[in-house]
Amino acid sequence: MEYEKRILKLFKNGYLTTKDVTNNNIPRLYLTRLTKDDKIERVSRGVYIKKNELFDEFVILQSKSKNAIYSNTTALYLHGFSNRIPIKYDITINNGYNGSLQKEDNVNLFYTKRELLRLGVIDYKLNSGNIIRVYDLDKTICDIIKNKKKIDAEIFNKAIREYFYSKKKNTLKLYEYAKMMNIYNKVRDTFEVLK
């Protein structure tokens, strides 16, 4: 009973991972007992919520891979550059990834070289208080230019226009990312049209 009480105290922003339990030297068996007793619910592999709590899809999907980063139109939405709530979540992952996100119907996976995966990653705080990894605005703009054929034209054009006139933009960072991603000319040409 003592272990079960300790587990219930470990929840952060409504979530608990198997790792949290093992890091506190609590046998996993007690997670199973709490699940059977209907006190907690397993929402994903290694991720639990308290019974009858609402869960956040952003947190659940990202918990499936430590390398998953929200990108493209999902990142645009999070940065306020698109008002379309994601039905399918855009997630960038390293080349060679072979995991459970590939089986998710509500995920569009984008792949990148391992050395570019962390380029422009920031911690983003959701309204729930949970923190997720997402690309910063400038890297997101590079991504949508790189993946233009896979992005809805209306969302693309609106985001490019808004970014061009935005006070949030960091043009130096944008072109630095573009060089590292080998899309400098594409990025320059995209914004030349607006000048």
Image (cartoon, helix red, strand yellow):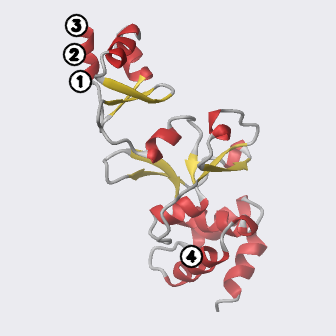
Q: Name the quadrant containing residue 38.
A: top left
Which residue corresponds to mark 2?
A: 5
Q: Position of residue 10 (x, y in %)?
A: 28, 25
Labelled pair 4, 1 in contact (Cβ < 8 Å):
no
Residue 66 falls left or right of residue 102: left
Mark sitting earlier along the chain (2/4): 2
Which residue corresponds to mark 3?
A: 1
Tell me the CA gap for discs 2 and 3.
6 Å
Tell me the kind of residue under disc 1: Lys
Labelled pair 1, 3 in contact (Cβ < 8 Å):
no
Give above or below for 40 relative to 12: above
Mark sitting earlier along the chain (1/3): 3
Query: Please, what secondary structure does the residue beneath circle 3 have?
Result: loop
Label drawn at residue 159: 4
Tell me the CA gap for discs 1 and 2.
6 Å
Query: Please, what secondary structure does the residue beneath circle 2 have?
Result: helix
Mark sitting earlier along the chain (4/3): 3
Direction bottom: furthest residue: 195
Q: Sort mark 1 into few (<14), some (14-19) or many (20+) by Cα contacts within 10 Å.
A: few
Tell me the kind of residue under disc 3: Met
Q: Residue at x 64, y 92 (%)?
A: 195
Labelled pair 2, 3 in contact (Cβ < 8 Å):
yes
Give above or below for 123 relative to 140: above
